[in-house]
Image (cartoon, helix red, strand yellow):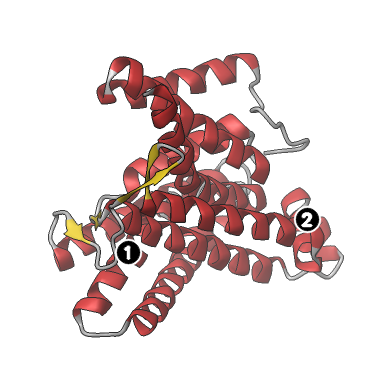
Amino acid sequence: MLTQQLLNGLLASGLYALFAVGFTMIFGIMGVLNMAHADLAMAMALAIVWAVTAGLAPLPAVLFAVAATLALALVVERFAMRPGRRFKGEAAIEMPLIATIGAGMILQNGAALLFGNKVIFFPWALPAFANVGGYLVSQGLLISAGVALVLLVLLEVLVNATSFGRQIRAVAQNPVAARIMGIDTNRIIVITVALTAANAGIAGALVGLSYGFVAPLMGIPYAIKGLVAMIIGGVGSLRGALLGAVLIGLVEACAVTWFGSQVKDFAVFVVLLLVLAVRPGGLIATPGAR
């Protein structure tokens, strides 16, 4: 029973990792939290639902949803995040934080007005289970974990082994010095926001694929778990975000097995407090992390 739950938790951690990596990349570069990040996942999932309902074939539906999600992400960056860069000190952190919270609420309530504040069935759900080595494995979660692993590897290569990745790291370490060296910091930030939005959108579609339904408020629990995974793993570390997500998935699995599903969120925050008490910088502390 415990092994089965641990396997489920490990597979679910792939979804948490996708959200955690998005938060990590934005915070690492801009020093702010994009609290509308997880709501972009919801937007992608509901855009797919709308497109399929409107009669579009799968590929055009996905392309429409990706375009809509990227457009929303760029609007959030332009009107909720960019104005905060004109300020210094605490205001540069607090203003985008508050603005993105507001943007997330607009997305949530706008979705509720369009689709109703209810659970909506996803058109391409894979809720069935497969027998793998004597264990029942959700087909949707298995696919989600595989896709998440591929995406995380690609992001790791992009950030650490490409010219664009070096520019991302330069902006994250010292935006002023990066500008002096000729790097267009605004372009880097906008592209990074678009990348993380696409990442969130894929995560939203995978949630629908794994569980068979989506909802206007579906982003809230994933935002919380993504932030916790980022903090546990170490702010600014992509590998840390993955490690934190895996730890959360396993802790939830143990909590459900031993104490019931009602205490799984409580167990996650207990682990967060323990990690912060022992390693305030997270499991993989990044030198110079903000």
Is the residue marked by circle 2 packed among few (<14), some (14-19), or many (20+) residues within 10 Å? some
- Which residue is nearer to you in this view: 14 or 282? 14
Name the spot of residue 79 as percent of width and height, x first. Answer: 45, 66
Name the spot of residue 23 as percent of width and height, x first. Answer: 53, 48
Say if 246 sits above or below 254 in the image: below
Residue at screen point 75% across, 61% down: 165
Q: Which mark is residue 20?
A: none
Instruction: Tally the numbered discs.
Output: 2
Q: Earlier in the sequence, mark 2 or mark 1?
A: 1
Which image quarter is the C terminus in?
A: top right
- Residue for badge 2: 160
Name the spot of residue 191 as percent of width and height, x first. Answer: 61, 69
Image quadrant in which you'd find residue 7: top left
Residue at screen point 23% across, 74% down: 50
- Can residue 237 be seen here? The reply is no
Which image quarter is the N terminus in?
A: top left
Name the spot of residue 136 as percent of width and height, x first. Answer: 36, 40
- Can residue 194 be seen here? The reply is yes
Image quadrant in which you'd find residue 8: top left
- Residue for badge 1: 45
Secondary element type, mark 2:
helix
